[in-house]
Amino acid sequence: MSARLLAENLFEQAIIYPNTDYRDRLNALIGLDNHKNRMAKILSLLINPEGIELWMNKYHPNAKRISDIVLRRPPLVILEGDVGAGKSELATCIGDAVARQEGIDITLLPLSLSTRGQGHVGEMTKLISTAFDYTVEKAGKLKNSSGKSKGGLILLVDEADALTQSRESNQMHHEDKAGVNAFIRGIDRIANGKLPVAVIMCTNRLNSLDPAIKRRAADILKFGRPNKEQRLFVLREPLTELGFTDDDIKDIVEITGETTEREYGFTFSDLIQRLLPSLVLDAYPNEAVNHKKAKEIVERIIPTPPFQDNTVVLK
Ligand SMILES: Nc1ncnc2c1ncn2[C@@H]1O[C@H](COP(=O)(O)OP(=O)(O)O)[C@@H](O)[C@H]1O
Ligand SMILES: [Mg+2]
């Protein structure tokens, strides 16, 4: 297979922003405003350095050293933490905010490692190298040495757990270490070429992340479970629509949190993709949702257990 064909099979469907669907999905994310703002700024800086240069000229025209330091930030942002917390969703939608802010088109190239590169020797390394070759080639065409980028790319490496083991770990197969090395080489190629590309990596296991990868992250953003207020925010509107009173809703918010038997509450996706549909499916097709019964239904739902990071990192 030619490198191009291989690359085209490698990525899931590319997304081009601005795109109103993704704008709406970004707006629908709850409790992530700080992460959204931070990511939009960092990605803008990486993809379109002209913006920060204009800002520097306006506010700090003599600040050459600091400007160099800021512009040389590594092109990687890591999203880490609990499952069902919005990592993939934020990574998939944030490009829209960046495209609007900078007034340029941005393309997302989504690579998921979970279902690929397992098995054949050399496969993971080849996959990573090919993904970066393709990204670097595409980005080279967008680069504009004088002034504004013609566009930008985001390479999304989702479910990167396959890559996140420390190279120092003895259990790690030689081949996996080669995969980590290929990833690091790719990041460095983008940084050294000053290409209009940002790489977003999502992982459930920050602890076992290779130190050399962590060191290259411009930012590491942590994701967690919703607190009481956030659960209320998620549930209030849909449950009110179904005829629940404020007190009914408070009860549901309470039982979806930590309990004495269970030291963790529901994840965002447990609430949105399991709890709410369960209430509807229980009543459908012959009756209305019954808020008295709802509590029982919710009590039967077992929230997703937190991701156990048992990987031993040898120092
Ligand atoms: N912070 C959030 N606000 C609103 N919905 C969320 C949030 N986090 C997750 N969801 C819902 O859960 C689904 C799964 O989230 P996802 O981003 O895939 O989680 P993960 O962190 O495991 O990548 C999303 O598509 C969205 O519907
Ligand atoms: Mg995910």
Image (cartoon, rainbow, N blue to C red):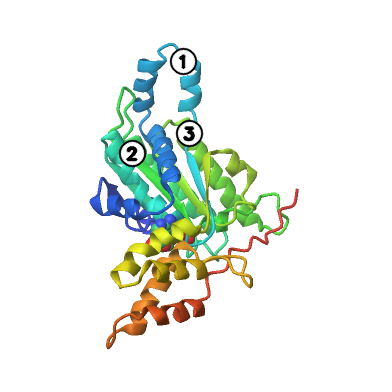
Q: Can you tell which quarter of the image residue 213 is in? A: top right
Q: In the displayed image of the protein, which residue is found farthest to the right?
A: 315
**Nearer to me, 305 or 122:** 305
The type of residue carrying mark 1 is Lys
In whole angstroms, how far apart are the C-alphas of marks 1 and 3?
19 Å
Q: Is residue 24 left or right of residue 275?
A: left
Q: Which residue is mark 1?
A: 64
Q: Residue at x 46, y 52 (%)?
A: 157
Q: Which residue is mark 2?
A: 152
Q: In the displayed image of the protein, which residue is found farthest to the left?
A: 20
Q: Which residue is mark 3?
A: 191
Would you place residue 259 above or below residue 228 in this image? Answer: below
In whole angstroms, how far apart are the C-alphas of marks 2 and 3?
14 Å
Which of discs 1 and 2 lies nearer the camera? The answer is 1
**Nearer to me, 109 or 83:** 83
Q: Residue at x 32, y 67 (%)?
A: 240
What percent of the width, then of the height, locates residue 98?
33, 40
What percent of the width, then of the height, locates residue 212?
62, 41
Earlier sequence position, callout 1 versus callout 2: 1
What percent of the width, then of the height, locates residue 290?
35, 81
The type of residue carrying mark 3 is Ala
Whether ligand 1 has any atom under 8 Å from the Cβ at mark 2 is answered as: no
**Nearer to me, 167 or 206:** 206
* Label 1 with label 3: CB-CB less than 8 Å: no
Residue neighbourhood size for the residue with mark 2, other residues' Cα within 10 Å, grouped as few (<14), some (14–19), many (≥20)? many
Q: Quadrant of ligand 1?
A: bottom left
Earlier sequence position, callout 2 versus callout 3: 2
Callout 1: SS: helix
